[in-house]
Amino acid sequence: MYYTYVLLSKADKNLYTGYTSDLKTRLVEHNNGHVPSTKSRIPLVLIYYEACANQKDALRREKYLKSGNGKIYIKNRLRYFWSNGTA
């Protein structure tokens, strides 16, 4: 399985979207500063993920979630999360 995921930076409150075949390990890599694009934004919290049967579908989904429409989708999908003051 491949996973498309969204992380919330507790440092700057911005989102990071990526994909991986090992979600637990990738989250540890992000929070240990081993990912250049997020190392200055730790700690990061996993707020959303989707499972895909293959890498191409996960990559396609990652690209969509990074687009303007994808960001709207995440905002709407996690409406309670944002309104609950959790973020």
Image (cartoon, rainbow, N blue to C red):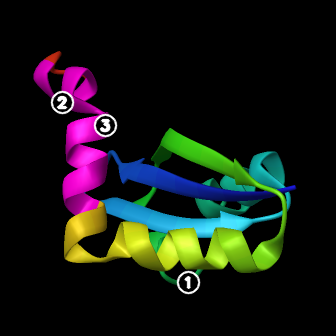
Q: What distance separates the C-alpha of mark 2 from that of mark 1?
A: 27 Å
Question: Mark 2: which amino acid?
Answer: Trp
Q: Is residue 15 left or right of residue 56?
A: left
Q: What secondary structure is marked by label 2? A: helix
Q: Which residues are magenta?
A: 71-83
Q: Which residue is mark 1?
A: 36
Q: Quadrant of the C terminus?
A: top left
Q: Is residue 21 visible?
A: yes
Query: Image height check: is 40 above or below 53?
Result: below
Q: Which residue is mark 3?
A: 77
- The front one of 35 and 81 is 81
Q: Is residue 34 visible?
A: no
Residue 67, percent from left and from top: 29, 77
- What residue sits 47% from the left and 54% below the top? 6
Question: Mark 3: which amino acid?
Answer: Arg
Q: Which residue is mark 2?
A: 82
Question: Mark 1: which amino acid?
Answer: Pro
- What residue sits 75% from the left and 66% below the top? 20
- Displayed quadrant of residue 49: top right
- The front one of 52 and 86 is 52
Mark 3 Cα within 10 Å, few/some/many (few <14, many 20+)?
Answer: few
Q: Which mark is residue 28?
A: none
Residue 27, percent from left and from top: 67, 52
